[in-house]
Image: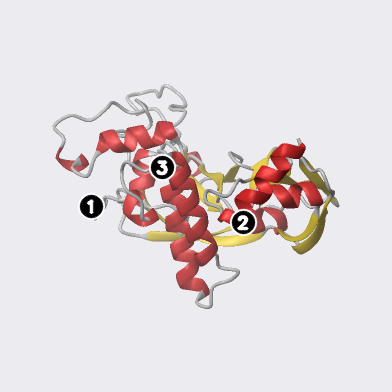
């Protein structure tokens, strides 16, 4: 089955000239709308959430976005392809088709993990025999939500090798505390060697799905909270979304732009019964338009300053 082109701009509902900030806002809006935890149809929402994350994975990264724009919708009609590994897309060894990883075949082919022919050859053979060779290792990206990383999970993936009509299904254990880039090994499930016991390994590279409400920073999670200037000056109380549920947080008077407020032990898993922290980063926003009355009050404040 041919690989289908993915229009990531259409997925996020933005134009090709959209700024990185526009892409970030579009992703957050759609991700909140289709997050499986809040949607009624969880299965449909999960599919949509994965599509949104894949689009943001590419368009939210300026380098990947530039490569995607260079690729273009007519990628399959281009007379020349970049060599394997050149810029992260095009060409290369195609091990087969994956399912259930959270990423499309299009993403895997041009932006995902690389499938290698592995560490070759065993002995040199004798009496005219062909040398025994080990099958290559295969990699694929596996999308994991922050909730799955925090609590652990089991996911089913499928894989059909290029030279086979049989689709194999695996139940993969996502360990609690898994991190971005971590590889989950399925021993002996890679490319076939000259003997079954010489088959390579299948590695699933963890890609943490971006959350609409907070981002990963090492062991910690960071939520950006927008506040109007008068609330930062006077102080207030707000509800903050965390992986453990909403928390009522007190914003002290005189809070500065960029200041971080800490909620201990609500970040990523760092060990048995240990977690990083959750930070609320204050972003003071100025209203773009104000009434005449509001202007008078701001002018009065300016005179006091």
What residue is shown with label 3? 59
| Quadrant of the rendering where the N terminus is positioned | bottom left
- Looking at the rendered structure, the secondary structure element under dot 3 is helix
- Numbered disc 2: secondary structure: helix
Q: Residue 253: x and y, percent?
A: 83, 48
Residue 144 in sight in this render = yes
List the residue tagged with mark 2: 293
Coordinates of residue 290 in the picture (x, y in percent): 56, 53
Label 3–label 2 contact, CB within 8 A:
no
**Label 2 neighbour load within 10 Å: few <14, some 14-19, many 20+:** few
Choose mark 2 or mark 1, whichever is in front. Answer: 2
- Residue in view at x 54 percent, y 45 percent: 207
- Residue nearest the observer in this picture, 1 or 52: 52
Query: Label 1 to label 3, Cα distance in Å?
Result: 23 Å
Within 10 Å of the Cα at label 3, are there few (<14), some (14-19), or many (20+) other Cα atoms?
many
Q: Which residue is mark 1?
A: 2
- In the picture, the quarter occupied by the C terminus is top right
Residue 142 screen position, x and y as percent: 51, 50
Helix, strand or loop at mark 1: loop
């Amino acid at each position: 089955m041919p690989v289908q082109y993915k229009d990531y701009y259409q997925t996020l509902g933005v134009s090709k000239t959209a700024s990185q900030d526009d892409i970030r806002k579009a992703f957050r809006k759609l991700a909140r709308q289709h997050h499986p935890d809040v949607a009624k149809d969880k299965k449909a929402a999960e599919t949509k959430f994965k599509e949104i994350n894949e689009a943001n994975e590419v368009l939210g990264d300026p380098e990947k976005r530039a490569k995607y724009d260079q690729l273009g919708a007519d990628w399959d009609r281009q007379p020349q392809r970049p060599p394997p590994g050149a810029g992260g897309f095009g060409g290369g060894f195609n091990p087969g088709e994956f399912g259930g990883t959270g990423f499309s075949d299009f993403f895997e082919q041009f932006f995902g993990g690389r499938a290698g022919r592995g560490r070759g050859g065993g002995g040199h053979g004798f009496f005219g025999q062909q040398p025994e060779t080990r099958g290559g290792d295969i990699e694929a990206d596996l999308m994991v939500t922050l909730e799955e990383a925090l609590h652990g999970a089991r996911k089913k993936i499928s894989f059909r090798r290029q030279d086979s009509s049989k689709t194999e299904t695996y139940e993969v254990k996502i360990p609690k505390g898994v991190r971005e880039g971590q590889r989950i090994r399925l021993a002996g499930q890679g490319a076939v060697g000259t003997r079954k016991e010489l088959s390579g390994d299948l590695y699933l590279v963890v890609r943490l799905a971006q959350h609409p409400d907070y981002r990963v920073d090492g062991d910690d999670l960071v939520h950006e909270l927008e506040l109007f200037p008068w609330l930062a000056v006077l102080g207030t109380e707000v509800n903050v979304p965390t992986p453990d549920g909403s928390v009522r947080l007190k914003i002290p008077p005189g809070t500065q732009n960029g200041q971080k407020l800490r909620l201990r032990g609500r970040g990523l898993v760092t060990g048995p019964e240990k977690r990083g922290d959750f930070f609320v980063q204050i972003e003071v926003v100025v209203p773009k338009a104000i009434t005449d009355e509001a202007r008078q009050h701001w002018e009065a404040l300016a005179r006091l300053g």
